[in-house]
Image (cartoon, coloured by chain):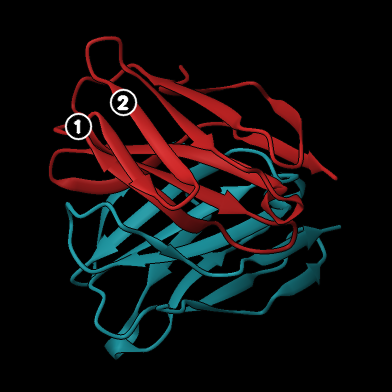
Amino acid sequence: QQQVRQSPQSLTVWEGETAILNCSYENSAFDYFPWYQQFPGEGPALLIAIRSVSDKKEDGRFTIFFNKREKKLSLHITDSQPGDSATYFCAASGGSNAKLTFGKGTKLSVKS
Amino acid sequence: GPKVLQIPSHQIIDMGQMVTLNCDPVSNHLYFYWYKQILGQQMEFLVNFYNGKVMEKSKLFKDQFSVERPDGSYFTLKIQPTALEDSAVYFCASSFGDNTGQLYFGEGSKLTVL
């Protein structure tokens, strides 16, 4: 049972374009949704996060859009750069437990 | 930012041997986690640990697995005996609180079981 789903599995965009990464979840108790960025051979690093009381969170070129009713969220990366090429994981946690449940990731390639 | 250190970065062992993976969490963090990742795919939760006790463990946390943090030293994951399917990258993470959700991950320990 996959509690956090991500799509697409892989995505290629040109430098300067906007990359859109999608995520959906099943557990209504989830209320915190971080996105992690992982480069090959490294650990995941927190990129940006949103709580379920908000519908949008922006940090520079990275924006999360959140739809609680549909249990969906998306990460938008504007003006994509080759250095953004990485795997992006959507994760979720809720209640009194900070344990994160991860999606399977979206591998982003930005071509110049 | 805060750093979680993991030792070793890579270990190769024969099936049936014991292995201990070490984690030095962020200094003021209280909650500790182990995740398993195979081939850069999904991060699978194994176990979390607080105040000297396992709080929750997943089905992947087999009887051969154990965790401890003796006297505030390294937070360790021990596998005894190892099996071929234990080959993976194991990530340690830590957090300050139990509901902040902000986990900091180490660089991972790649385990290869032959």
Location of mark 1 (residue): A52
Q: Which of B35/B16 is in front? A: B35
Circle 2: residue type: Phe
* Residue B35: % across, % down: 50, 52
Q: Residues within 10 Å of mark 2 (few under 14, many from 20)?
A: many
Element carrying mark 1: loop
* Residue A37: % across, % down: 56, 51
Residue A51 relative to residue B92: left or right: left
Residue A35 relative to residue B16: left or right: left
Q: Residues within 10 Å of mark 1 (few under 14, many from 20)?
A: some
Q: Is residue A108 in view from this perspective? A: yes
Element carrying mark 2: strand
Circle 1: residue type: Ser
Location of mark 2 (residue): A66
The part of the image, by quadrant, that contains residue B7 is bottom right
The colour assigned to chain A within the rendered structure: red
Chain that is cyan in the image: B
Figure check: A7 above or below A63: above
- Which mark sits nearer the N-terminus, 2 or 1? 1
The part of the image, by quadrant, that contains residue B2 is bottom left
The disc numbered 2 marks a residue on which chain?
Answer: A
